[in-house]
Image: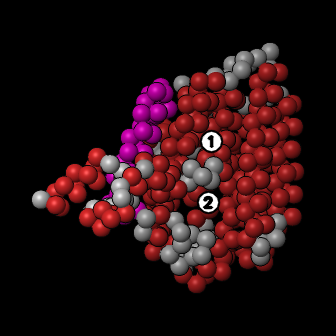
Amino acid sequence: LDRRMAWICSRAVPRAGLPPSTHALLPAARSRQPIVRSQSTATAAQPYLQLMRLDKPIGTWLLYLPCTWSITMATPAGALPDVKMLALFGVGAVIMRGAGCTINDMWDADFDKKVARTATRPLASGAITHFNALVFLGAQLSAGLAVLLQLNWSSILVGAASLPLVATYPAMKRITFWPQAFLGLTFNWGALVGYSAIAGTIDWAAVAPLYAGGVAWTLVYDTLYAHQDKVDDAVVGVRSTALLFGENTKPVLHGFTAAMASLWTLAGVLGEQEWPYYAGVAASTALALRLTQRADLDDPASCMAAFKAHKWVGLLMFAGALGSTLCRL
């Protein structure tokens, strides 16, 4: 009975207001237990955002820019490119670049664990399981299909034709020293889709050299990128043009830059472009040559900086194509 009375008093009167002689009769105050909250949505999503490289947008830029060139070149003379179409391709670039990164990391998880720069990627570090990555890839491809279905049937078929390249590119570093060439075939496919989305067909005379010039461009920037990991790649058995070209990398890349410029110039001639287009080709070529020449191929930070700066090479091409379209009255 005394204990029950003490318990009632502890609820009705604050302990501080009781005589000291009654304190011993009161139950000890319960310590507050920390509240365990469920993992926030943002925290749970972070590994998936890292998997699709949303924190590293340079890859999205390099995938998107060839689309802008062909969309602009296919635009009727004197008109501005369709902003809605540019935005749609931008969304598609984000999604499909993310899907490509997911496929790449699923292929390369064991390699990535052995390379310092890639060891913290979600699959390599164990933050995401392969099954969850596969489910996420299905969601990405579904979203990409939803974007593709907004285009005309010609563009849908051309876009779908790129899927074998997207799926097999990661395997190329295991069987050839030219994975950068296969990346070029994949990353510049948007030049074909973009032209078809505006014109309803592809003017191969102009678009084929535009596409081929883009492949040469990719060989330049992705070889610079590959030089970051050449030491680790040689140890784990990954092949690249960085290892193939070795000490001859810079003169070889200058040669690819010359091929890029020649092919883009040919695309302009056959596509009846005006002088701003050629100014864009000249400016982008000069910048590409400068980036290669200034890069320290033994310094990963320098290689990464040169790689990222190639976004401006593509933007100069877009500016030239836009100026040409506006001049064709």
Report the front residue among 310 and 261. 310
Looking at the figure, which quarter contains the N terminus?
bottom left
In the picture, the disc for residue 181 is: 2
**Does label 1 or label 2 sit earlier along the sequence?**
1
Looking at the figure, which quarter contains the C terminus?
top right
Percent across and percent down for residue 148 are 46, 34
Task: Identify the residue at horizontal 50%, vertical 43% (top origin).
Answer: 95
Placement of 300 over or under 328, stated as above or below? below
Task: Identify the residue at horizontal 85%, vertical 31% (top origin).
Answer: 276
Q: Could you tell me if the residues under marks 1 and 2 are in contact, i.e. CB atoms within 8 Å?
A: no
Tell me if mark 2 has few (under 14), some (14-19) or many (20+) residues whose alpha carbon lies within 10 angstroms of its own: many
Residue 67 visible? The answer is yes
Tag 2: residue type? Answer: Ala
Mark 1 to mark 2: distance in Å? 18 Å
In the picture, the disc for residue 31 is: none
The magenta span reads 128-157
Label 2: element kind: helix
Which residue bears the numbered disc 1?
64
**Which of the 4 image quadrants contains residue 324?**
top right
Which secondary structure dominates the residues rendered in magenta?
A: helix
Percent across and percent down for residue 125 are 47, 70
Does residue 207 appear to the left or right of 326 in the view shown?
left
Percent across and percent down for residue 37 are 37, 53
